[in-house]
Amino acid sequence: MEIQEKEQPIDNAAYLNMDLLRFTTAGSVDDGKSTLIGRLLYDTKSIFEDQMEAIEEASTKKGKGYVDLSLLTDGLRAEREQGITIDVAYRYFATPKRKFIIADTPGHIQYTRNMVTGASTANLAIILVDARHGVIEQTCRHSFIASLLQIKHLVVCVNKMDLVSFSEEVFQKIKTDFENFSATLNIPDIQYIPISALLGDNVVEHSANTPWYKGASLLYTLENVHIANDRNHEDARFPVQYVIRPQTEDFHDYRGYAGTVESGIFKPGDDIVALPSGFKSKIKTIDFNGKHLDIVHPPKSVTFTIEDNIDISRGDMIVKENNQPQVSQDVELMVCWLSDKKLTLNGKYAIKHTTREARCVIKEIKYKVNINTLEEIKDNFEIGLNDIARIVIRTTTPLFFDSYSKNRATGSLIIVDEGTNVTVGAGMII
């Protein structure tokens, strides 16, 4: 890509309608995640002048002979002191082709829960591998979590190629090792790119140091990866977040149901069912910003009005009459435990699923997953921080859900400790 092309101004109207890609970075400690993001922002002219001055000043204070671009995302004092990422850092930038939201996630094992948080809404994951160390435990851990979270696109960036003399042999060995591991993962699209985040090789433009690499640069890959079909456009799901009743003279009889279209397509005139009541009606209007829409796709936030006055409240779900989710109080799920306090069998917790809140009891622990081998551990049911397990819960009220593999929005939930109100588990419904 030519520099002149990147410097073209982005039309504001076009920017609002531009495609958005959410992606996350993951990898072990010191694999260069923050440096890579800093390089992307720097080379796409997405850093303000005062930001650059602050980074240059901080780099000088640290005694570095170069501008440390990792300081763009490592904003916490503890992160800068230790040279590591602790919390998830979000950054935003755009090119003439696409808008981006980046989640820079930690590499330490004890911060795996932060990686789950950052990756939960991502379309794509970048897994960084240090060319000197190859595929290691954290590489497998983060790749498995990406697969568990149904991220369909994975880019394996073999970083620090400058420290192995841009060796094609080193790159190919890492690619082969990762292919052997990823054969058991549910990730349909995996690409491999040799890079140097520090020097910028193959990040925005092709590098002359890797003439043997015939693939695309990282930025080109991010700009062109196809994500339009990743969302579920078949199963229409509209969790109700709020009931709108203005009761003014202009809107005396108005009753609208506000929320986000999580999946599927809705149009006025569609036959719908309100869950859990099961009452049927038709969509009268779909309102957005004072206008009536003819059709709505995810993830649009809108207000429905329906033809019949039926009882619908927050936590209910509007679905198509001929396409309904599962309704049950017994739910089986994979859970990533996020708390130092261990999961308690038969313990009682609060849960949040779409806009619905309920309480649950942990009925059964089926197995724990060995992150390194992906084997099922059935002789140790102690589930602690960062563990991933398959469990069964029973809820106080029915949930309306799809499997996570089919619908990320209605197939996910969080588990909350009722005593502290702390989120202790992230669940993916099977």
Image (tube, rainbow, N blue to C red):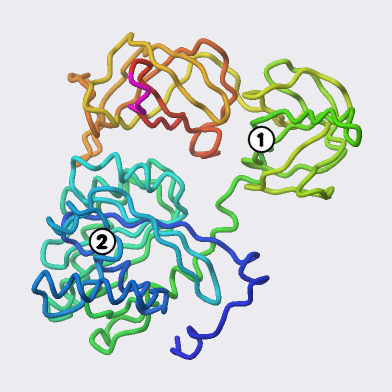
Crowding near the residue tagged with mark 2, few <14, some 14–19, many ≥20 C-alpha atoms within 10 Å: many
Q: Tell me how far mark 1 sits from mark 2, CA to CA.
A: 35 Å
From what the image shows, is residue 180 above or below residue 383?
below
Residue to which mark 2 is pinned: 128
From what the image shows, is residue 425 above or below residue 417?
below
* Magenta span contains residue 422: yes
Q: Which residues are magenta?
A: 420-424
Front residue of 3/233: it is 3
At horizontal 11% and vertical 75% (from top left) the residue drawn is 64
- The label on residue 237 is 1
Would residue 69 appear left or right of 250 to someone viewing this image?
left
Q: Tell me which label, 1 or 2, sits earlier in the chain.
A: 2
Q: What x and y, as percent, mark residue 382? A: 20, 20
Which amino acid is tagged 2? Leu
Which amino acid is tagged 1? Arg
Q: Dot 2 lies on which element?
A: strand
Classified by dominant secondary structure, the portion drawn in magenta counts as loop
